[in-house]
Image (tube, helix red, strand yellow):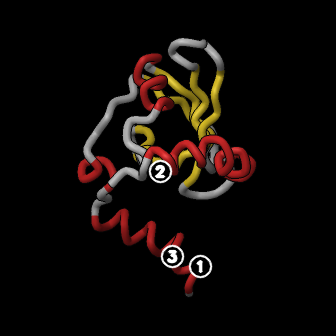
Amino acid sequence: MPLSRAIGRFNRVATNRLTRLIAGRLPGFGIITHRGRRSGRTYRTPVNVFRRPRGFVVALTYGRGDWVKNVLAAGQAQVRAPPQPGYLASPRLASAAAALMPRRSSFANWSRSVIEPLFG
């Protein structure tokens, strides 16, 4: 369920400025660089991003926010996510079930590489 617009506005003004400093370096986080569809201004938005064999999956925490509209309108964006930067070409919206649910074997590999070092 998307978070409220008030929380989204607060995060855009306050939290995102701090998150941008570390988001491009932490697993599960990244920074999407995109252009405003009206202003043409360049924006850097911290997001939850996950690599997949055919590209990236980005969590839409606030639903279809401005950055989502900008990326879809432009048809492209840059992604800075560990271990190396990437590029979104022809981005599209997908359901969470189709995009995020890993196959059983890849989830097992992910859980061993991420969860065990944190809690093991």
Distance Cα–Cα, label 2 vs label 1: 18 Å
- At mark 3, the secondary structure is helix
Residue 15: horizontal and vertical position, in percent? Answer: 66, 51
Taking depth in this image into account, of 34 and 12 the one nearest to the observer is 12
Q: Earlier in the sequence, mark 2 or mark 1?
A: 2
* Quarter of the image with the C terminus in it: bottom right
Residue closest to the eye, 98 or 52: 98
| Vertical relation: 51 (above or below) 76 | below
Residue position for label 1: 118
Query: Is there CB contact under 8 Å for labels 1 and 3?
Result: yes
Q: Are marks 3 and 2 in contact (CB under 8 Å)?
A: no
The quarter holding residue 69 reads: top left
For the residue marked with disc 2, what is the amino acid?
Phe
Disc 2 crowd, CA 10 A, few/some/many (<14, 14-19, 20+) = some
Under circle 1, the secondary element is helix
Q: Quadrant of residue 41?
A: top right
The residue lying toward the viewer, choosing from 1 and 77, is 1
CB within 8 Å, label 2 to label 1: no
**Amino acid found under the numbered disc labelled 1:** Leu
Disc 1 crowd rating (10 Å Cα; few below 14, some 14-19, many 20+) is few
Which residue is labeled 2 in the image?
50
| Residue indicated by mark 3 | 115
Q: What is the CA distance from the residue labelled 1 to the residue labelled 3?
A: 5 Å
